[in-house]
């Protein structure tokens, strides 16, 4: 794999269309996460304290808003996309034998899909929206 | 594996090598937390009591130290990622890559130190009267 000699990040692939797409998607999700993940960390640690964000608080405050549910679901998709592509690059560097690499990467993709399903399930099904509707 | 470590630690011009090693380590660290974090948020719906127990750990002193490290990893990865992106988009910035590297560290400490102080407040808040009591007799 080719690297930028200065930043040592992956150089833009010159060959296959798939790898070029991976390269662009990594950077596109990076820009989204620069805003989403940093503001999420700031809200959960600087605006509120971890001690006050109980399950009840999430139901009745944070996720009683469609805006914040959408924000969190978009962040979930971006972070799973970005981390799956990043870990794919890391694991491909570590595991070089084709069979082992295929197994490890399959595991990564299955884990990513499971996390997407569980994360989406809670965003979409957690009661709390009726609190917003009642206001 | 040894090939990977060799690649990671081969000297290729100072800042770039360190930036690369730290980018990978912080990326892997944040990914591990994401796996935990999606599962704990899933528990908000599936088992709220279990979620509240995990939250109690996040709010504990040990949890706060780990969140500070998580925040550091996230902030470093975000800032160095921006540096990578800027150089990818405008290769002429390569000329200033060292300045960009130092700028990312200025932002890292400038934003990170106040952030760490806020997260760790319950730990150091208790220490101030204790230390003051040791140094100034009669103050508690």
Image (tube, coloured by chain):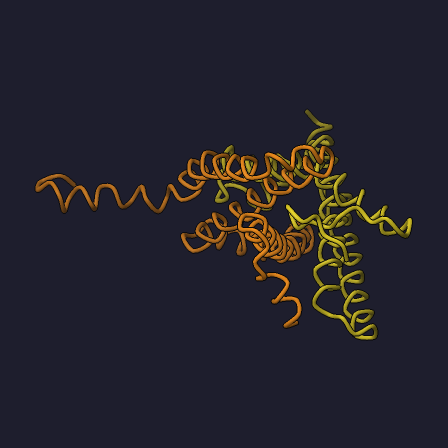
Q: Residue furthest left?
A: B137
- x, y percent for residue A5: 67, 49
In this picture, residue A74 sits left or right of residue B29 = right
- x, y percent for residue B112: 47, 39
Q: Which residue lies furthest to the right in this view?
A: A17
Residue at screen point 59% across, 61% down: B10
Res. A115 in view: yes
Question: Of residues A12 and A61, which is closer to you in this image?
Answer: A12
Q: Is residue B41 above or below residue B106?
A: below
Question: Of residues A5 and B60, which is closer to you in this image?
Answer: A5
Q: In this view, does A15 lie above or below B137?
A: below
Q: Colour of chain A?
A: yellow
Res. B48 in view: no
Q: Which residue lies furthest to the top in this view?
A: A135
Q: In this view, does A38 lie above or below A91?
A: above
Residue at screen point 21% across, 46% down: B130
Question: Of residues A51 and A116, which is closer to you in this image?
Answer: A116
- x, y percent for residue B26: 58, 52
Q: Quadrant of the N terminus of chain A?
A: bottom right
Q: In which quarter of the image is residue A88?
A: bottom right
Question: Of residues B139 and A111, which is closer to you in this image?
Answer: A111
In this picture, residue A103 sits left or right of residue B23 = right
Q: How many marks?
A: 0
Q: In this view, does A32 lie above or below B31?
A: above
Q: Chain B is drawn in which colour?
A: orange
Residue at screen point 79% across, 53% down: A117
């Amino acid at each position: 794999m080719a690297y930028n000699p200065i930043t040592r990040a992956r150089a833009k692939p010159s060959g296959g269309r798939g790898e070029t797409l991976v390269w662009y998607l990594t950077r596109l999700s990076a820009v989204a996460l620069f805003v989403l993940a940093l503001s999420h960390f700031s809200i959960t640690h600087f605006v509120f304290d971890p001690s006050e964000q109980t399950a009840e608080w999430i139901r009745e405050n944070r996720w009683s808003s469609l805006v914040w549910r959408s924000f969190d679901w978009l962040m979930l998709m971006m972070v799973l996309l970005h981390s799956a592509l990043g870990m794919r690059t890391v694991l491909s560097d570590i595991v070089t034998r084709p069979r082992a690499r295929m197994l490890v990467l399959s595991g990564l993709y299955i884990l990513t899909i499971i996390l997407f399903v569980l994360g989406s399930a809670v965003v979409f099904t957690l009661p709390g929206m009726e609190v917003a509707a009642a206001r | 594996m040894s090939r990977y470590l060799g690649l990671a630690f081969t000297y290729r011009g100072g800042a770039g090598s360190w930036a690369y090693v730290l980018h990978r380590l912080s990326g892997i660290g944040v990914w591990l937390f994401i796996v935990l974090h999606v599962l704990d948020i899933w528990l908000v719906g599936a088992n709220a009591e279990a979620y509240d127990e995990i939250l109690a750990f996040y709010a504990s002193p040990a949890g706060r130290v780990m969140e500070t490290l998580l925040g550091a990893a996230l902030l470093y990865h975000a800032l160095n990622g921006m540096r990578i992106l800027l150089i990818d988009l405008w290769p002429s910035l390569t000329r200033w890559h060292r300045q960009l590297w130092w700028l990312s560290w200025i932002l890292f400490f400038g934003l990170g130190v106040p952030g760490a102080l806020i997260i760790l407040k319950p730990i150091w808040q208790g220490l101030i009267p204790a230390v003051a009591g040791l140094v100034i007799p009669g103050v508690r």
